[in-house]
Amino acid sequence: AQTVTQSQPEMSVQEAETVTLSCTYDTSESNYYLFWYKQPPSRQMILVIRQEAYKQQNATENRFSVNFQKAAKSFSLKISDSQLGDTAMYFCAFMKLSGGSNYKLTFGKGTLLTVNP
Amino acid sequence: NAGVTQTPKFQVLKTGQSMTLQCAQDMNHNSMYWYRQDPGMGLRLIYYSASEGTTDKGEVPNGYNVSRLNKREFSLRLESAAPSQTSVYFCASSRDRGIETQYFGPGTRLLVL
């Protein structure tokens, strides 16, 4: 079974600064996807970024980028130029692509990020 | 497009009551999912439907039933609610099983007394 660990329950950052959220995972699979989701106070889950395990290049989406270290099974999220609207719970998630259960997202417990003015 | 919509947004039930949570998507997605989110935990999959006419159990299916009414709609039913089912429920959809990104609804907060 896969596990996803987010070791930082809460973090805070000043507006306009950069923050990095950590995520590690445990799997024996070689083919999988990793995701970061954002959950603001509205509770809706919003996809921030995704990374295919077979790609060596780190994914980027505007101010959001990841540092994917496959050998270390690490998948951190960097938020540059933090904005007040980035305040949310952030979830790291894993999806394997082999076998009959390739539908399933496994989530970490989340990191609550607060951006301070 | 509204994306994924869920009703109701909030519900209070007494132990033993039944109710159905509704979910609909307008993105022509084939796959749909129901998750629950408890405090301090990530989302856990209850049931999913890979395509119209099929449903399968997820990680925590006990106490729930689902119906894939058509391609757009996927409902979750609690036949006899228990306090342990107090949670926030999320519906999600994706174009297909597998690598496709899942899009989530706004959630339903359920309180069982």
Image (spheres, coloured by chain):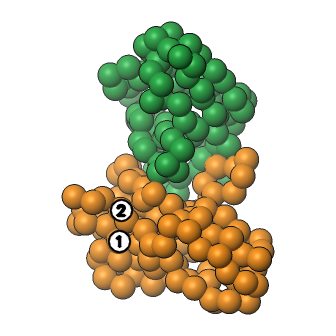
Chain colours: A green, B orange
The residue marked by circle 2 belongs to what chain? B
Q: Callout 2: helix, strand or loop?
A: strand
**Which residue is the site of mark 1?**
B24
Q: Earlier in the sequence, mark 1 or mark 2?
A: 2
State how far apart marks 1 and 2 are (Cα).
6 Å
The residue located at (38%, 20%) in the rendering is A63
The residue located at (57%, 19%) in the rendering is A116
Q: Are marks 1 and 2 in contact (CB under 8 Å)?
A: yes
The residue marked by circle 1 belongs to what chain? B
Please, what is the three-letter code of the amino acid marked with disc 1?
Answer: Ala
The percent position of residue B54, horizontal first and vertical second, equals 41, 80
Asked which quadrant contains residue B88, the reply is bottom right
- The mark found on residue B85 in the picture is none
Picture quarter with the N terminus of chain B: bottom left
Picture quarter with the C terminus of chain B: bottom right
The percent position of residue B95, horizontal first and vertical second, equals 30, 59
Q: A89 or A107, which is in the foreground?
A: A89
**Which residue is the site of mark 2?**
B4
The residue located at (60%, 27%) in the rendering is A114
On screen, residue A108 versus residue B105, left or right, reads: right
Please, what is the three-letter code of the amino acid marked with disc 2?
Answer: Val
